[in-house]
Image (spheres, helix red, strand yellow):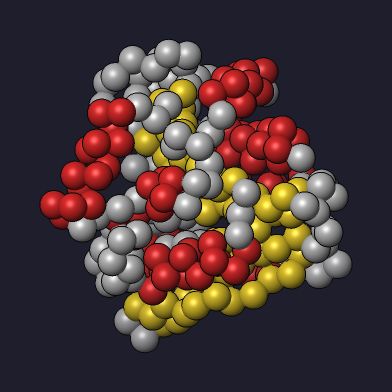
Amino acid sequence: MAVTSPIDVDRYVARIRAFDAERYEIATEATVTDRERAYPVLSVRSRARANKTLLVLAGVHGDEQAGLLAIPAILEAHRSERVRLVVITPVNPVGAARRSRLSAGGHDINRDFLRFRTPEARVVRDVFARERPDFVISLHEGPQRGTFMFANRFVDAALARALCDDLHRGGTMLAKKDYFGLRLDPPGLSPSFAVGRAITKLWAVAFRLKATIAYSEDREIPELVLESSSRTVDEAARVRPHVDLVAAVAKRIA
Ligand SMILES: [Zn+2]
């Protein structure tokens, strides 16, 4: 989906591991193998003694790499003593290496939050249980024009609007329509609504499928799924919504 070249996962992992050990604790949560090559799923935790925890999921879909590209800048920028940042990256390392939506085992990890057949979804589940996040952001890209985000019903409506304003002020172009062609009002925001929740429930019952945003909702944790535009070619513009959203949420939930 992305127009720029795919990331080199080994170099990416080395870059994350090189982050300042005084600021971040970095751990290998799992190792996923593909054709006898092992890829780590890392967790990065800021050492601040904060009372709020913000969990960021980067690279659930391996072909949507803007979120992965944004993580070094996100780690660089995060200085909050009030919000502890926890990042899982890459959630789907084999997908990132192959530039595929699917996991090492050929599954969509973002449909696996009911059955947990994939080790990648189990990592996310275990980190949820251990870190008890107050807020979750999952970083994705979509084919629509401009950036928008899905919010579950625990994201405060005024907060969601303020975050759209923050993105807009930072220079992100907000989408007027989502990738289904549905109009977004305000631009940039796809809030939780009754029909959507009914479809989510049906998915779970009929197909045993569940996404992270519904998993969070079951736990009464607010989650935003950021969908930046994969049409964006310029790398700074491609990464910006991800960096700005994490910073804005960290500031506003502190
Ligand atoms: Zn995605």
- Residue visible at 65% across and 58% down in the picture: 86
| Above or below for 171 versus 151 | above
| Residue at 64% in and 70% down | 14
Q: Is residue 157 left or right of residue 74?
A: left
Q: Position of residue 19 (x, y in %)?
A: 75, 64
Q: Left or right: 173 with respect to 240?
A: left
161 displayed left or right of 48: left
Q: Estimate the x, y position of residue 11 in percent, counting from the top left.
A: 59, 66
Where's the C terminus, which quadrant?
Answer: top right
Q: Nearer the viewer, residue 120 or 220?
A: 220
**Which corner quadrant of the image does residue 180 belong to?**
top left
Q: Residue furthest bottom?
A: 36
Task: Using residue 245 as the reference point, say whether residue 47 is left or right of it.
Answer: right
Vertical relation: 144 (above or below) 112: above
In the image, 219 versus 38, the foreground residue is: 219
When asked about the image quadrant of residue 249, the answer is top right
Work out which quarter of the rendered image holds the N terminus and state it. top left
Residue 207: horizontal and vertical position, in percent?
16, 54
Residue 139 appears in the figure: no
x, y percent for residue 58: 52, 53
Name above or below for residue 90 compared with residue 38. above
